[in-house]
Image (tube, rainbow, N blue to C red):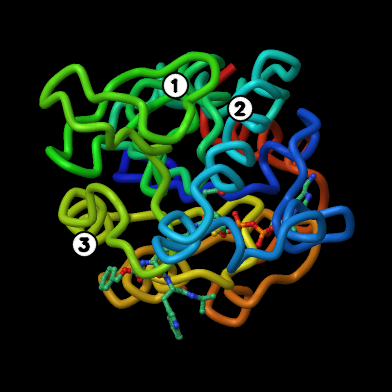
Amino acid sequence: MSVAGNIVILTGAGISAESGIATFRGPGGLWEGHRVEDVCTPEALARDPALVHRFYDLRRAALDTVAPNAAHDALARLDAAWPGELLIVTQNVDDLHERAGARRMLHMHGELRSALCAACGTRRPWRGALPPATVCPACDAPALRPDIVFFGEMPYEMERIESALSRADLFVSIGTSGAVYPAAGFVRAAAAAGAATLELNLERSAGSTWSGETRLGPAGVLVPTWVDSLLPE
Ligand code: BJW
């Protein structure tokens, strides 16, 4: 793009893979150790809260051992410099975009370093373990849970995302398989609104057929190259 336009960027687990965080559906993916239906549904949380809390405690603790990679750094650079509208919508629950310095971003599937009160709906920053039945400081109910959007639950900030998609000139998806909705439908929504669409991924995803252009390779290489092409020296 030669003039500043509105950019929406959707990121998935692939952007954090080179930081050492396993993807969900690839070889060695998280779900190989834990069946998704065992850990990522409201029913599983009700049936076995200890298992679900322990799963997310381990992943929260693992954040201390990882760091943003060149792809996160490049998006933060773009966020700081891009004069048009820009929104990074991440499906990831890690905090690597913000640790790289991104500001115009949101977590549509929740955050590991946040706790949600199932009783009053309050969200609060959370570090360390979160045992089941932890008391909510806002309402005193023993109802704090991981602030994670489980299957069947509504992702966060859908109105803001849909609004940004409707104004987008360019939609870019990075490192996502296109297996989970509503995120998997964003490329079609953006294209229907007139945006150019670009996919950056290690391999073709379920969304490739809807993308105007697909570039294959590791995010740590493709994303800095793409950002360099948008920003002047
Ligand atoms: C690299 C790379 C490298 C690797 N460089 N690339 C039937 C049809 C349609 C929909 C449904 C249906 N039945 C049920 C639904 C809805 C359901 C759904 O989509 N289910 C599917 C399984 C079909 N969705 C929901 O329930 C959602 N809520 C909802 O729909 O509410 C109702 C609603 C109505 C109307 C409007 C809006 C909403 C909630 C979904 C919640 C998802 N939660 C999870 C867990 C989060 C917490 C956690 O981390 O534990 O989110 S599931 C998991 O999948 C996680 C991810 O964010 C999400 C997407 O995964 P992602 O990021 O794409 O990762 P992978 O592993 O799949 O792919 C990695 C990619 O990276 C691959 O492509 C690699 O090639 C690539 N890669 N290394 C670049 N180095």
Q: Position of residue 83 (x, y in %)?
A: 30, 26
Residue positioned 47% across, 20% down in the render: 98
Q: Is residue 227 above or below residue 10?
A: above
Q: Position of residue 30 (x, y in %)?
A: 74, 51
Quadrant of image for the C terminus: top right
Front position among marks 3 and 2:
2
Quarter of the image where one finds residue 79: top left
Q: Position of residue 188 (x, y in %)?
A: 40, 76
Q: Which residue is mark 1?
A: 102
**Which amino acid, by three-letter code, is at mark 1?**
Ala
Which dot marks residue 128? none
Does mark 1 have its CB less than 8 Å from ligand 1? no
Q: Which residue is mark 2?
A: 72
**Disc on the earlier residue, 3 or 2:** 2
Q: CA distance from mark 1 to mark 3?
A: 22 Å
**Disc on the earlier residue, 1 or 3:** 1
Q: CA distance from mark 2 to mark 1?
A: 8 Å
**Disc on the earlier residue, 2 or 1:** 2
Q: Which residue is mark 3?
A: 166
Marks 2 and 1: CB-CB under 8 Å? yes
Q: Is residue 174 left or right of residue 118?
A: right
Q: Position of residue 184 (x, y in %)?
A: 47, 70
Front position among marks 1 and 3:
1
Residue positioned 53% across, 39% down in the render: 53
- The answer to whether any part of residue 89 appears in the image is no
Q: Is residue 181 above or below residue 19?
A: below
**Which amino acid, by three-letter code, is at mark 2?**
His
Q: CA distance from mark 3 to mark 2?
A: 25 Å
